[in-house]
Image (spheres, rainbow, N blue to C red):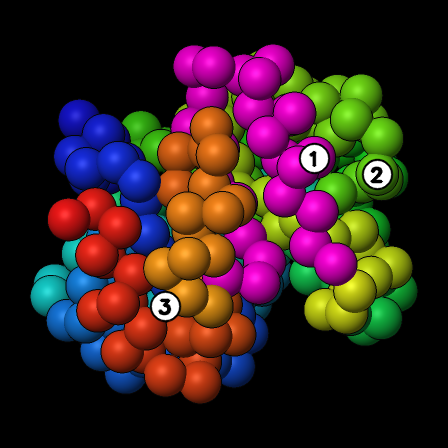
Amino acid sequence: MMWFEKIKYPIIGLAPMFGYSNRDLRLKSRQAGADVVFTEMVAAEAIIRDVGKAWEMLQFDKEERPVVIQIFGNDPDSIAKAVKMIDKKLSPDGIDINFGCPVQKASKQGFGSVLLNNPELSGKIVKSAVQATNIPISVKMRLPSKIVKDIVYFVQTVKDAGARLVTIHARTQTQKYGGHADWELLHKVKKSFPDLMILGNGDIETTQDIKDKLGNLDGVLVGRAAKRDFKIFSELKRVKE
């Protein structure tokens, strides 16, 4: 069984946050009640060059499982090589591809949310990862636009490439972390993918937020609220109870 098939609905997990989703926060989040934790993103190129800092960021304790390692890059071959190395050395529960980072540096270097503008390349990246391992590959993305068919097209592309789970941050690239996270768009997208695990992300602060925003989705990932206080997972898991 894949990691997400072992978790009681809805999934409530720690989102990947660069500089924050480290071993300490991941372990505390799991102890507080998070169902799954994602690592901060690490460059595929740094992994295949065997950069010590990159591998240090990827290390995890068994108490963190299920743990999903997130990587980023824009070259399918590099992604495949990195996935093979991660599989061999660490054997995490999942590997996640970042299509959601909105910062300017990511855009200039051609990775993160800028890849939402290139579904074909994004599909090749996911397919290369899927073919490199038996570990389930997932995707974290933002809204390519506020048009449902655009979002559906991107999700369909990565699904066809073999992604088994997709997390959607309900903001566009240009919104970054401001403005309104549009969960209604996520609900509309999910209707097109009843057999694909789709998690929502953005502005989950309380149990009431999950009740109001979850809708037909399979779960949520919590970012900034967990960064402020990991104990939020103790409250959020009451939704299951």
Residue type of the residue flagged with mark 1:
Leu
Q: Are marks 1 and 2 in contact (CB under 8 Å)?
A: yes
Alpha carbon distance from label 1 to label 3:
33 Å
Q: Which mark is residue 185?
A: 1
Residue type of the residue flagged with mark 3:
Leu
Q: Nearer the viewer, residue 196 or 158?
A: 196
Q: Residue at x 21, y 46 (%)?
A: 240
Does the stretch in magenta take in 182?
Answer: yes
SS for callout 2? loop
SS for callout 3? helix
Residue type of the residue flagged with mark 2:
Lys
Q: Are marks 1 and 3 in contact (CB under 8 Å)?
A: no
Question: What range of the chain is rendered magenta?
Answer: 180-204
Ranked by sequence position, the earlier of labels 1 and 2 is 2
Residue 147 found in image quarter:
top right
Q: Residues within 10 Å of mark 2 (few under 14, many from 20)?
A: few
Q: Which residue is mark 3?
A: 58
